[in-house]
Image (cartoon, helix red, strand yellow):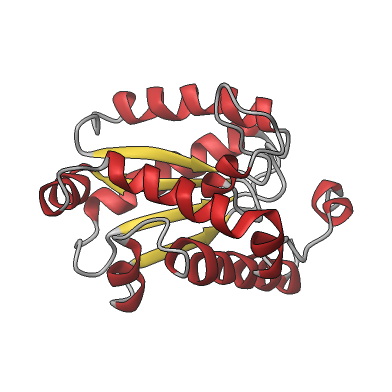
Amino acid sequence: MTGEQEKTVLEDTKRWVQRAVIGLNLCPFAKSVEVNQRLRIVVSPARTPEELLQQTAHELLSLNRADPDETETTLIVHPWVLNDFLDFNDFLGAADALVEDLDLDGVLQVASFHPDYQFEGTEADDVDNLSNRSPYPTLHLLREESIERAVESMPDTDAIYEANIDTLRRIGRKGWDALDLDAKLPLSQRATRED
């Protein structure tokens, strides 16, 4: 991975966080984390699922050790591996098993975003899927205590999902496309292995 590629991926991810996650209020808890600079974004150089799993273990342990006032959550953006959504979806089981293997079950969890994210029972082009679409495949490492605090502050968490669907259906594909969230790093560069 070149420095320029990493910079592009990082900029694309930050733009998505700012314009979609925060801008559309898809996650009402994200703004304070971003504003207070407690979001860590890691661009992974992993080229295989095994390398990504190793890095995920490292990042889970790092997040667990970190002061929550410094780092509350971590995004692992991995543009060179698991670009196929079905492969990515299969990998999530290994990520969840890893949390258990590291004795972090109940402490941390892994959420997911992907450029081709598709909820069960939806068509690929349904706007409902956009709430979990990111420029690149991304693992979101979350603290359980952060989730518990969020649920306490907003007991009806189903309302978040419903509001997201309402927002996405209101703006439609045209409104989403106007946010300019597509990955700027071409898939051909992501698929090319460095020697």
Q: Percent x, y for residue 168?
A: 54, 52
Given residues 66 and 78, the one toward you in this image is 78
Q: In the displayed structure, does residue 23 sit left or right of residue 169?
A: left
Point out the residue furthest to the front here.
170
Q: Position of residue 34 (x, y in %)?
A: 36, 72
> How many labels were placed on the picture?
0
**Location of residue 60 in the rendering, given as x and y in whole percent from the top left corner:** 35, 44
Task: Compare residues 188 and 30 and report the one nearer the observer.
Answer: 30
Asked whether, in this view, residue 114 is left or right of residue 174, the answer is left
Residue at point 61% right, 38% down? 117
Task: Give above or below for 1 relative to 60.
Answer: below
Q: Is the residue 159 above or below the residue 88 in the image? A: below
Residue at point 29%, 39% (across, down): 158
Residue located 69% across and 69% down the image: 178
Picture quarter with the N terminus:
bottom right
Say which quarter of the image contains residue 3.
bottom right
Instruction: Where is residue 112? Give x, y as percent.
Output: 49, 40
Q: With 191 as the anchor, is 28 left or right in this view?
A: left
Comparing 163 with 86, the one in front is 163
Residue 61's place in the image compared with 122, above or below, is below
Give the side of residue 125 with respect to residue 97, left or right: right
Kindly indicate the quadrant of the structure image that contains residue 85. top right
Residue furthest left in the image: 152
